[in-house]
Image (cartoon, rainbow, N blue to C red):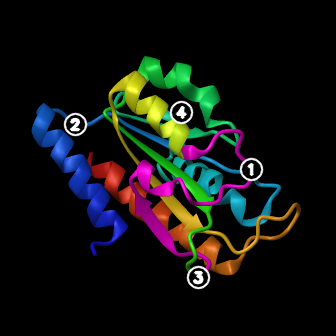
Amino acid sequence: MESWNHQLREKLQQIRNKTGNVPKIAILGIGSELNGDDAAGVLVVRQLIDRLHSLSSCSPNRCIFDCGTVPENFTGVLRQFMPDYVLLIDAGSFDETPGAIMFAEFEDTDDMSFSTHSLPPSVFANFLIQEIGCQLNLMLIQAANVEFCHPMDPAVTSSVEAITEILAGLLSEF
């Protein structure tokens, strides 16, 4: 199986080939920094914004959002931006070692555990696809502990840093 960064690169290239344009990309970090490893998604987007040295989280071809635990609050700005592609980044439980990364279709996550969200990510993803007509994937980071005030697992922290580095490089290409 291809690694997540190759799958993502291929997906973005397919959109570029189909439309003839640079794809408009929205990246949404989901989670709570008060709940240990559940902070992984929001930390990726915060570090990504810092890494890209952006004064704003949006440019003509990309928007990056720290959604906290309520990504559904960002549907209005997503409708305005009208991305071709949305990447949701979150911590989850999919029976792997802490820090493992899964790049998934939203339909494949219905049986997974997401502890701090008001809506399951698959419901939110389906809504975005119907409303915006975008393509969408979930990037999940296997959590070790999502208890209140628990520190992040070192393996999860390492994955956050690796994802940030790879996404920063990829976004500079698109």
Mark 2 touching mark 3, by CB under 8 A? Answer: no
Q: Please give the range of residues in magenta.
A: 98-121
Q: Tell me what residue is drawn at x 39 percent, y 32 percent.
A: 129
17 relative to 173 in the view: left or right:
left
Q: Which is more N-terminal, label 3 or label 2?
A: 2
Mark 3 touching mark 1, by CB under 8 A? Answer: no
Q: Tell me what residue is drawn at x 53 percent, y 53 percent.
A: 110
Mark 3 touching mark 4, by CB under 8 A? Answer: no
Disc 1 marks which residue?
Answer: 116
Disc 2 crowd, CA 10 A, few/some/many (<14, 14-19, 20+): some
Disc 3 crowd, CA 10 A, few/some/many (<14, 14-19, 20+): some
Q: How far separated are the C-alphas under marks 2 and 1?
A: 34 Å
Q: Which is more N-terminal, label 1 or label 2?
A: 2
Q: Tell me what residue is drawn at x 61 percent, y 31 percent.
A: 72
Q: How far separated are the C-alphas under marks 3 and 1?
A: 20 Å
Q: Amino acid at mark 4?
A: Ser
Of helix, strand and loop, which one carries label 3? Answer: loop
Q: Tell me what residue is drawn at x 63 percent, y 73 percent.
A: 156
In this rendering, which labeled residue sits more in front, label 3 or label 4? 3
Q: Which is more N-terminal, label 1 or label 3?
A: 3
Up-down relation of residue 17 to residue 144 (above or below): above
Q: Amino acid at mark 3?
A: Thr
Q: Which is more N-terminal, label 4 or label 3?
A: 4
Q: Which mark is residue 56?
A: 4
Q: Which mark is residue 22?
A: 2
Q: Which is more N-terminal, label 4 or label 2?
A: 2
Which quadrant would the N terminus be assigned to in this image?
Answer: bottom left
Residue situated furthest right in the rendering: 149
Disc 3 marks which residue?
Answer: 97
Q: Nearer the viewer, residue 44 or 107?
A: 107
Magenta span: chief secondary structure: loop
Q: Is residue 115 magenta?
A: yes
